[in-house]
Every structure is written in structure tokens, then in C-alpha cells.
Image: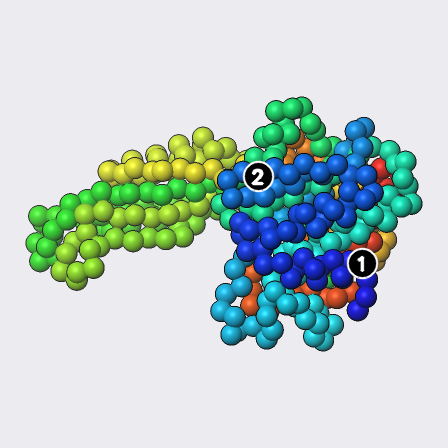
Amino acid sequence: MSSETFTLTRDLISRRSVTPQDDGCQQLIADRLARIGFVAEHMRFGEVDNLWIRRGKAAPVLCFAGHTDVVPPGPLESWLSDPFEPQIRDGHLYGRGAADMKSSLAAFVTAIEQFVSEQPGHAGSLALLLTSDEEGPAKDGTVRVVEALKARGEHIDYCVVGEPTSVERLGDMIKNGRRGSLSGEIVIRGAQGHVAYPHLARNPVHLFAPALAELAATMWDDGNEYFPPTTWQVSNIRAGTGATNVIPGELHAHFNFRFSPESTVGVLKKRTSEILERHGLDYDIDWHLSGKPFMTRRGKLVEAVSAAVSSITGIDPELSTTGGTSDGRFIADICDELVELGPVNASIHKINENIVVEDMDTLSRIYHQAITRLLNGG
């Protein structure tokens, strides 16, 4: 296999950029794009490398966004080949980050290079926003870059995030929004005692059980035509001292809302507290909001990307707001229209992560056509 997109994907996978490390990925991309007139701004916050690189000063601004960091590979003995030495087998390229999302980064670059060679005097501006903190806490990455851009009045008109959104075939799903994510850590207080003398203790597990059942059964909202209903899930629950004859004094639980725009953070907190108080619980909750819901309705960006997918692959892509969060939740603060489109996500974060080899060039062609439609009305 020999193509610019394949070669760059392979080079990026070879860099061991386990979050929050970048291992030179951003510099590699910056050096390539500098040759065609991009001006790079490296922004390092804490241990996190970020890159904002732009060509042009005029509107509209079309930005491609993504991350150079990858999740840890897991047990190396379970991989069929070294996760950081990309290998082709049966028409697939294997390596950590192959699908999430170094192939998207390579496709960004080669699509932009081709477009600029064809249209060196193109309208508007092209930009990339890259971070090495998407797979980690996401506190010193894209969110910090967006804050810096916002503070100096920079605005993005269109953004394409290269997250792996496809399900069965490349291009079959475009994310045009994401649900919000609100987490809570709750402490239920009881009174510790001996299991043989329950009348002298208050078991927080027993106290919490009816409230837990109600929380799990509650319909928080009905969603809307773009978003599924809000969900509430417990991710961890623990209590006890380790001894089998002791009633615990406290119960700790972690839970998460994935919420639609039909519910607000304030309402979700209020309804949660009302349920807990109705059951007479002595509790505290530590809340953490990691992202508000956002959505891009059909407009220039959705139509351009959808048309590019259809033209290149023959697929009519589905618009969806399902799944987890992405850095799109931060970029939406300074961006009018944002979508996510990338490779098939079946192997992401797994042992033997991979991408179909031919999909890399196809993705580059889709991005190239989207650029052409947005910046030159093609």
C-alpha cells in the first residue's frame, strides 16, 4: 500500500502517544502544513500539547479537530503485532490509534494539501485544532485552547471532528450533536454496627435501596426528534469495612446522566435531590459537569459533509446524537456548525485496533470534497 494518507497514518501510529503524551505527532503535522502557508501556534498546558494552526485570516473559518493521544494498548501479549509498529493484514492496518483517530488526522492533512494545491487563493480560512488530552481528563486540552481563542475573539464557522463515527461502513453515520454528561458522587450516611444487632445501627445500603430503585425507574424526559431520552446509570457502588459481621456506616456511589437538551443541569440536580429527600436520606453529592448537549441542525456544514459522503461512497449517511462525549462539546462554544465524521468504530480502544486500508484514502477524499463545497461552493 502506498499513498500519502496511508504513509502519514502509519507514521503517526508509530509514535507512542499514550495520553497525555503527543510524542511529536503535532510537530510532524505542523511541519507539513507550514510548507503550504499554515501558521502554527503550539499551546502547552500542564503536561498536554495542543496545536492551533491556521491558513488565512478571512471568514468563513473551516476547522478540522482531533486528538493525537491514544488509550494505553493493554496487554501486549494479546496483540497479534506490536501496537506501535503498524502492520497490514487481510486488507486492514493494525495499530493503536488506527481508527481512533490517527487515520482521521492523516486524512485531514492530505485533504487540505490537495485542496490548497488546487485552490491556493481559496476563500476563507482553514485551521486544525489538535490536542493530546482527549483520551485523558480533558482538562488541559481542547477546552483550554477554546478558552484562549475565545478570549482573543477568534471564531470558527464550521468544524469537522474526526472521531470514529461510522458503524458498519465508512460514512454511514455523521454525529451532528452529542448528549450532555453530568456525573455525581453520592455519600449516604447511616450508622455502623454489628450485624447481629441491626436495631442499634442504620444500614445505608438498605436505606438507599428504595431511592436507587426510584432513580433508576424515573423518566427524566422524552428526548426530542434529535436526541434520545435522558438516561441515569450507576457506574460504581461500594460500602462496608471488609468484615462480614459489620453493618457499614456509609455507602458511596457514582452515577451519570447522559442528558438531552430537554433537561437542564439545574432541573436534573433538583429532581435527584427531591427523590433522595423524599426517602429521608442523610446524603451529600459532589457534582461534575463534563459537557452540555449541543447540536447542529441541517445547514451548510451538514449538507456539505453529507453530500461529500454520498458522492464518494454512495451512502446516504444517518445523522445521530448517540454515543459518548467528544471534544466537540468544547468547540461548540465558539463554533456555529459542528459535525463529527470518521472511521468505523468497531475496534476502537480494543486489542488489535484496526482500519480498512482503503478507507483511509476514501476518508481523505470525503474531507477534500467537503472543503471544496464549503470554501468554494463546489
Q: Is 226 placed left or right of 121 in the picture?
A: left
Give the crowd class for mark 2: few <14, some 14-19, many >=20 residues within 10 Å.
some
Residue 253 place in picture, x, y as percent: 33, 48
Q: Residue at x 81, y 39 (%)?
A: 37
Residue 173 place in picture, x, y as percent: 70, 53
In the picture shown, does residue 82 fall above or below 142? below
User: Which residue is under mark 2?
Assistant: 44
Q: Nearer the viewer, mark 2 or mark 1?
A: 2
Q: Which mark is residue 4?
A: 1
* Residue 111 vs residue 246, the one in the foreground: 111
Q: Is 106 placed left or right of 96 in the picture?
A: right
Q: Residue at x 65, y 60 (%)?
A: 13
Q: Is 160 placed left or right of 110 in the picture?
A: left
Q: What amino acid does circle 1 point to?
A: Glu
Q: Secondary structure at mark 2?
A: strand
Question: Can see residue 322?
Answer: no
In the picture shown, does residue 344 fall above or below 211? below
Give the crowd class for mark 1: few <14, some 14-19, many >=20 residues within 10 Å.
some
* Residue 243 vs residue 93, the one in the foreground: 93
Q: Quadrant of residue 65?
A: top right
Q: Quadrant of the N terminus?
A: bottom right
Q: Residue at x 30, y 37 (%)?
A: 284
Q: Residue at x 66, y 47 (%)?
A: 26
* Residue 256 vs residue 365, the one in the foreground: 365
Q: Which of the two discs, 2 and 1, labels the residue nearer the N terminus?
A: 1
Q: Is 233 placed left or right of 252 in the picture?
A: right
Q: Which mark is residue 205?
A: none
Residue 212 place in picture, x, y as percent: 34, 48
Q: What amino acid does circle 2 point to?
A: Arg
